[in-house]
Image (cartoon, helix red, strand yellow):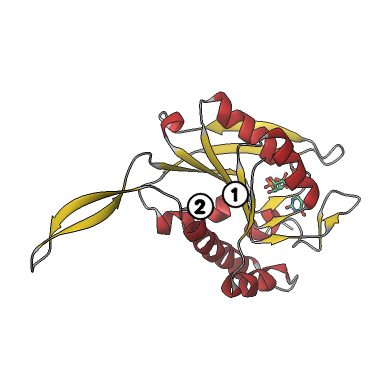
Amino acid sequence: MSKLHVVDHPLIAHKLSIMRNKKTGSKDFRELLNEIAMLMGYELTRDLPLEEITIETPICKTKAYTISGKKLAIVPILRAGIGMVDGLLDLVPVAKVGHIGLYRDPETHLPVTYYCKLPADIDQRIVILVDPMLATGGSASDALTKLKEHGCKHIKFMCLVAAPEGVAKVQEDHPDVDIYTAALDDCLNDHAYIVPGLGDAGDRIFGTI
Ligand code: PRP
Ligand code: URA
């Protein structure tokens, strides 16, 4: 069973509360989303393997540590996942970025795939799939399946707000993928929106409300 990590930090809680407020405009919403992505990225990269190297400081030779092994790829689910990419790239500037385009059908709430462009060596990388909202879990689950079809074996999923229904779906479909979220909310409403949530993340990021 995959692990659910609720990344619990006062700065994240504070910033998320501002994002939830319906009076917060797109500029602040975008900035806060990237700031939280960077803070969560710190936790998500905690288990990256290190290797020992020898370097020379201006004073003497010494042992030092550098990240070893697999490199990272960040894959946002379009559109809203784009809002988390820059924050993660601030932390890991050499990561490659792929894109998976999905939208939820407004009637069925089921995901519809319309785009997929991934780095050629994606199967050799640790992949961080990002999307601010994990509601029914359909979009995240389909995106994870797509990544696995491209050979990805080491994947983490990062969101901002998760519903219990979405967590259960991803854990059932992808028991090998850990989920990182800033908050676990109460439930979904009749339109499959997260309650209390923050509304439609894509619309709030891009000002398309
Ligand atoms: C939102 C969100 C997720 C999806 C979550 O995208 O960004 O991708 O819904 O819902 P689910 O867990 O029930 O699948 P949306 O379909 O609104 O597309 P957008 O990002 O282009 O606005
Ligand atoms: N997509 C969103 O943007 N928000 C929700 O609450 C659910 C799906």
- Looking at the image, residue 142 sits to the left or right of residue 42; the answer is right
Foreground pick, 72 / 7: 7
Q: Is residue 150 left or right of residue 69?
A: right
Q: Which residue is mark 2?
A: 85
Picture residue at 49% right of the left edge, 61% below the top: 38
Q: Which residue is mark 1?
A: 81
CA–CA distance between discs 1 and 2? 7 Å
* Mark 1 Cβ and ligand 1 under 8 Å apart: yes
**Residue 130 pos. (x, y %):** 58, 48
Whether label 1 touches label 2, CB < 8 Å: yes
Point out the residue furthest to the right here.
Answer: 190
| Residue drawn at the location 66% of the way across and 35% of the way down | 174
The amino acid on which the numbered mark 2 sits, given as a three-letter code, is Val
Which residue is the extreme one toward the left? 59
Is 49 on the left-hand or right-hand side of 166?
A: left
Q: Position of residue 66 (x, y in %)?
A: 28, 52
Quarter of the image where the N terminus is located = top right
Residue type beneath disc 1: Gly
Q: Nearer the viewer, residue 194 or 155?
A: 155
| Image point (66%, 37%), residue name | 175
